[in-house]
Amino acid sequence: MDDIEIVGSHALRRLGSEPARDASLTRIRHGLYARTDELVAASVETRYRARVLAAAAIRPGAIFALESALAMHGLPFGVEPAYVFTTGDANTPGSRAGVRNSHLPIPERHVDAVGGVRVSSIAWTLGDVARRRLPSEAVPPLDAALRDGRVTKEQIADALGRQSRANRKRARWSLAFADGLSESVGESRSRVAIALLGFPAPELQVEVATAEGVLRSDFGWRLDGRRLLGEFDGMVKYGALAAAAGRTGAQALAMEKAREDRLRRHADVVRWVWADVMRPERLERLLRDRGLPQRDRILPLGVRLPD
């Protein structure tokens, strides 16, 4: 995981810099700064991890939880939280200076140290996130942890059983739904949206044999003898493809277009982007237009889709 260097204001002044007047520096919290260019170039998780590390510098004995623990464990969550989260300290206020603290204790066996920071274990964190967050937020880190083999569903379920009973039903839904075959936050959130909209569950990482070789698609359904393939387009993969192959972004985009043309010779293809996942009614229209059958919308555990 990439790191962002955090420097205290005293160190900056010793170097002759005045952080309040230096546009190359961005304050993370009082007295702690990072390079602005590093923050701009960083992923959501890396930027948030810098906030967690800054909070840990101020509260060295704290145990970090929820998305803060996910960030330290290197698990994705996709949308940067407004707060840093700690737990277990009855003497710490519930909310102060951008940090939210829960007074609920964590068993010592579920406290790990990552980069010198105390955090809830992966199993405990995933169970806790699944209880406290909607499936669209809980499933991506669950999928990622299962994909990397860092934890099992049984271990998460055991940790969940040691937590509050509040929202356990929701947590069990997310845990049962999680699948390590999902390869990104966008794919995970797409699967949740597809399920909540009442469409049939897709096959994941579908292989399609073509004259040019085997191609893989994110999602696939079989409909009355024909195949429908689904592609989540994160709009950033072309840059990654280009960098990996030593090509420009335009060349990578052209390669992806050629790949999709080959897929279309063997199946119908529907493609969607982040905006369609965040507004599920848009994804609903796309899938309906391709003839995907739909049951009544599933609204598990009180989760409501946007109007």
Image (tube, rainbow, N blue to C red):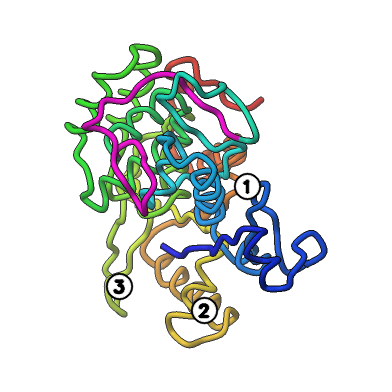
**Residue positioned 47% across, 22% down in the render:** 102
Residue behind mark 2 = 252
Q: CA distance from mark 3 to mark 2?
A: 20 Å
Residue behind mark 1 = 275
Name the residue at the front extreme: 14
Q: Quadrant of the N terminus?
A: bottom left
For mark 2, give the secondary structure: helix
Few, some or many C-alpha atoms within 10 Å of disc 1 (few <14, some 14-19, many ≥20)?
Answer: few
Inspect the image, locate mark 1, and give the three-letter code of the amino acid beneath it: Ala
Residue behind mark 3 = 210
Q: Is residue 144 above or below residue 13?
A: above
Q: Is residue 272 magenta?
A: no
For mark 1, give the secondary structure: helix
Q: Is residue 238 above or below residue 157?
A: below
**Residue positioned 31% across, 46% down in the render:** 113
* x then y, percent, for residue 238: 53, 72
Q: Which mark is residue 123?
A: none
Q: Which residues are magenta?
A: 99-121
Q: Quadrant of the C terminus?
A: top right
* Res 263 seen here: yes
Inspect the image, locate mark 3, and give the three-letter code of the amino acid beneath it: Thr
Name the residue at the bottom extreme: 246
Q: CA distance from mark 3 to mark 1?
A: 31 Å
Name the residue at the top extreme: 165
Few, some or many C-alpha atoms within 10 Å of disc 3 (few <14, some 14-19, many ≥20)?
Answer: few
* Res 219 seen here: no
Inspect the image, locate mark 2, and give the three-letter code of the amino acid beneath it: Ala
